Amino acid sequence: MSKVIISCAITGSIHTPSMSPYLPVTGEEIAAHAIGAARAGAAILHLHARDPADGRPSADPAHFMGFLPAIKAGCDAVVNLSTGGSAVMSLDERLAGPLAAEPEMASLNMGTMNFALYPMLGKPRSWKHDWEEPFLRNSDDLVFRNTPRDIEGILRRMGAERGARFEFECYDLSHLHMLAHFRDRGLVKAPIFIQFVMGVLGGVAAEPEHLAHMKATADRLFGTDYQFSVLAAGRMQMPMAAISAGMGGHVRVGLEDNLFLSRGVLAKSNAEQVDKVRGIVEALGRTVATPDEARTMLGLKGADAVAF
């Protein structure tokens, strides 16, 4: 496990445009941030789409196609499209863009959960768009739906039918057991790539003890058939990435997960965060994986087999 896969989540669907002037929103901005992150060392680009008019989360195929061809032309990184979209979307809405694009990878949330964003309202700010404040405020009554039927449908439609492999996003122990359930049914096969998602209110907190327990549980459930990565939302992003790299895992950074480079300093690009985590990884004596090395490690179909 000397090679570390750096994933970079470019924009997401959680932060809103008023929170940072550097959050990419338009197709051109998302493409530029993604290519910059790849050049800095990100082997995987985890991508959401946004409506360029107001930055609202979107899964419209047209919005995805506003940046996917440019990213493919500008770098050789693995494209990993979110099937989570936004927690306020229906499943069909969430899947519209990924189904059309047929990427090498897709993310898959492994359980229904609360997904509370309203604590972000604690900092006073002027809102650029009228959707932002209600979007955050109403998350105190938000259920992010990912039922077993939903999961099975995504595994079939994105995986079996379109050849994508998955970043299995596990926010809690129950999600690991759900993943093992689908493995036992033969719907998930090795190599399994698990993303431990930490620090979202509604999921496990970003604490080292929780990570150790989740990894021990995954070891027991999946043995040598899996690899893991860690993302931590907010200020624990880099500390938890360092712990993951030290434990033999992979790392994820990006403006989807954290808008800052250091305390009180906004990251001006996704590449800045990739540069920082690369320095951490290499200081630990590990080597950053190239996109093609990541493809081999995760058994991906290749960039020539996508639909963009």
Image: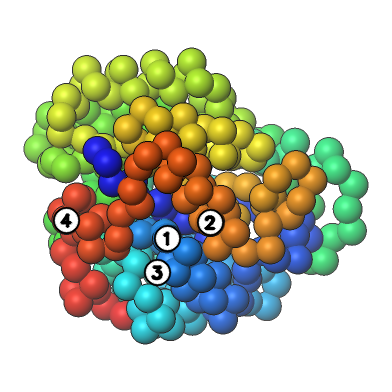
Image point (56%, 51%), residue name: 276
x, y percent for residue 88: 56, 51
> Few, some or many C-alpha atoms within 10 Å of disc 2 (few <14, some 14-19, many ≥20)?
some
Q: Which mark is residue 97?
A: 3
Going from the N terminus, do you reach mark 4 or mark 1 first? 1
Q: Amino acid at mark 1?
A: Gly
Q: Which residue is mark 2?
A: 275
Label 3 residue SS: helix
Q: Which residue is mark 4?
A: 296
> Few, some or many C-alpha atoms within 10 Å of disc 1 (few <14, some 14-19, many ≥20)?
many
User: Is disc 3 in contact with disc 1, using a CB cutoff of under 8 Å?
Assistant: no
Going from the N terminus, do you reach mark 2 or mark 1 first? 1
Q: Which residue is mark 1?
A: 41
In the rendered image, the vertical position of residue 169 relative to residue 154, given as above or below: above
x, y percent for residue 86: 53, 53
Query: Looking at the image, can residue 35 be seen?
Result: yes
Going from the N terminus, do you reach mark 2 or mark 4 first? 2
> Few, some or many C-alpha atoms within 10 Å of disc 4 (few <14, some 14-19, many ≥20)?
few
Label 2 residue SS: helix
Instruction: Nearest to the eye among marks 3 and 1: give it.
Output: 1
Going from the N terminus, do you reach mark 3 or mark 1 first? 1
Give the spatial CA distance, label 3 vs label 1. 26 Å
